[in-house]
Image: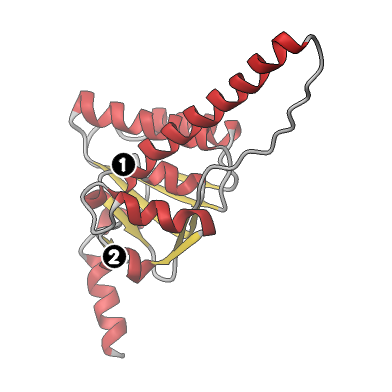
Amino acid sequence: MTADTIAQRAGAASYPLLAHPHIQLHGTVDEAMYTNFKGQLINAPQDGPLVVSITTLGGDPEMARAMADDIRLLREYTGRETLFLGKVAVYSAGATFMAGFPAEKRFLTRESRIMIHERLMNSTIHLNGPLITLGYTLKAKLHEIEDSIRIQDEGFRDLVAGTQVSLDELKQKAPSNWYIEAEEAKRLGLVLDVI
């Protein structure tokens, strides 16, 4: 047995609860995942730490924020410990969900990766009608973009709180899709440990 294997087993043995997550999510972050999440949350044990695992290539950031808000409310209103376990891929909306857990309560499995990027928008502005109304159409779209940036920045602040990554650093790297391997995520303090 190699020294790395012994160290990996010792690390996993330090967190036995992570071996059997109470809530296991995989696939696209969407309304179906949120419904699945809520069902598993209702059926999870009502006491002790709650372990939530996720594997996702991304999806709807608002559904990720809704799940993260449920975790926050559970933690704040009951004082219950909540643990995050990212498995294999924690991309895009998965990282948004991860931000709902304090950095010291986050874990990744070996060889997992996080991918963080800016919110995306695919929109066409169709201008049709009296000239006086067209400015309002453009202003409405601008307000949508500005508010989406504010929401994105709130999530980015939560993601880096208590870590060695500054908000400015994250905002510089996010536009080009920042992929972070598990050990680097640990080194940066984005997760407590790799198991």
Q: How far across and down, in percent of the image, does residue 99 sit?
A: 35, 43
Name the residue tied to disc 1.
158
Residue sticking out furthest to the bottom: 2
Pointer 2 local density, CA inside 10 Å: few below 14, some 14–19, many at least 20: many
Residues 98 and 170: in front is 170
Where is residue 65, by image quadrant? top left
Residue sticking out furthest to the right: 128
Residue 151 seen in render: yes
Q: Is residue 63 above or below residue 165?
A: above
Residue sticking out furthest to the front: 131
Q: How far across and down, in percent of the image, does residue 139 sit?
A: 59, 20
Left or right? Give the position of 18 relative to 58: left
Name the residue tied to disc 2.
186
Left or right? Give the position of 9 relative to 153: left
SS class of the residue under badge 2? helix
Label 2 vs label 1, nearer the camera:
1
Q: Are marks 2 and 1 in contact (CB under 8 Å)?
A: no
Q: Is residue 80 above or below residue 161?
A: above
Q: Mark 2 to mark 1: distance in Å?
A: 16 Å
Report the residue at 37% width, 29% height from top: 69
Q: Quadrant of the N terminus?
A: bottom left
Where is residue 15, by image quadrant? bottom left
Left or right? Give the position of 99 relative to 111: left
Specify the amino acid type for callout 2. Lys
Report the residue at 18% width, 31% height from top: 79
Pointer 1 local density, CA inside 10 Å: few below 14, some 14–19, many at least 20: some
Report the residue at 37% width, 28% height from top: 70
